Image (cartoon, rainbow, N blue to C red):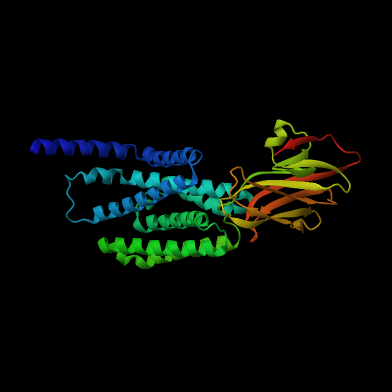
Amino acid sequence: MIGSRFKSSARFKRLKGLYDKYERILIPGTLVFGVAVDFVTFRSIQINTAFLLLLVHLVVAGSTIAFMHIYDASKRKDQESRLRYFRLAAPLVVQFTFGALLSASLIFYWFSGSFSVSWPFMIIIAALMGSNDVLRHYYLKPVVQIGVYYFIIFSLFALVLPYAFNSIEPWVFLTSGVASLFAMLLYVEFLGKYLVHVRYQRSGIAVIVVGIFIVMNGLYFANIIPPIPLSLTEAGIYHSVQRIGGEYHVVSEPESFLDRILPGQTIHIVNGERIYVFASIFAPADLDTTIYHDWQYYDVEIRQWVSRSRPSYSLFGGRGDGYRGFSFSSNVSPGLWRVDVETERGQTMGRIRFNVEHVEEAVELQKLIK
């Protein structure tokens, strides 16, 4: 019996020694692994299955955080218990689940917004992912972990509820925030039953949680948070767009491979010719909303983008390849232009930049089918 305990203790010490030695590799490694799992998973499974996996990650993260601090605070913890092995691995589990949840948020929000508009929110998510390693010792503190955990809960609620309600109206986002506050209240109350220091730090936790709630709502109503669940799958500038049956026939200038991958396209038109913007948007089934194309011209005299027109069309979700629509503008002045593909509230899904040059004769064109 004594020999068995001695072997078990020696085995645990070896594992802990290896963990302490390779901690700087294991911590970021589990984070990267979580990101890689998300990248592969969310490109190959249905959205409902992806949400189920995110829920599992969320529960595992919350449970592991609670276990870590309850185990550490236990006055009667058994040093021979098998739970000590899970306690040793718990930081890695938290890192993996945080990495998976944050990268999932980044993936979904990235494809639903334009980085040039939504970059503050994207950077917040990326910074939280990166700081997992740089500030890993701070992440062991309950207040910090709870703060990051609440941000993840809010982000995921704001991601899932629009699918559940088939709506992107402001009340859905506000409902996400209220639901996340309620979930965090229950979680902190649960931790407070077992952890004295959490009970003493409730005011600090409340300040952090409410602060995150206010910042998230500020970003949303400033139209910086992308319009989940909409995402722009394709967009382009053309000389003509015509719908024939279930197909869209577009006319464009021939492009080289370099032209296709570099941002900023030059379109050559005869004075008075129309320019068309074609966009394909992914939307879940039964979503009914309005899409706007905000045509903006860069005025070099005042050095500002000036909105020239904002045509719209209705979107009814459910098409696997995305809902398609287009708009056009006449008498387009030469110079720099951009078209923001937006929701009714002004949330930007994507931005098309192009340069207009007037020519005397029509250039060579090609026909494509979308």
User: In the image as oriented, which residue stretches furthest toward the right?
Assistant: 360
Residue 134 appears anywhere in the view = no
Q: Horizontally, is 200 left or right of 313 in the view?
A: left
Which residue occupies the foreground of this view, 218 or 315? 315
| Residue 9 position by quadrant | top left
Which residue occupies the foreground of this view, 230 or 210? 230
Residue 336 appears anywhere in the view = yes
| Residue 189 position by quadrant | bottom left
- From the viewer's perspective, is residue 370 above or below residue 171? above
Q: Which residue sits at x=70%, y=31%? A: 257
Q: Horizontally, is 112 left or right of 330 in the view?
A: left
Q: Position of residue 329 (x, y in %)?
A: 80, 52
Where, quadrant-wise, is the C terminus in this rendering?
A: top right
Q: Horizontally, is 171 left or right of 57 in the view?
A: right
User: In the image as oriented, which residue stretches furthest toward the top?
Assistant: 257
- From the viewer's perspective, is residue 178 above or below residue 87? below
User: In the image as oriented, which residue stretches furthest toward the left?
Assistant: 1
Q: Position of residue 22 (x, y in %)?
A: 34, 37
Q: Position of residue 293 (x, y in %)?
A: 71, 54
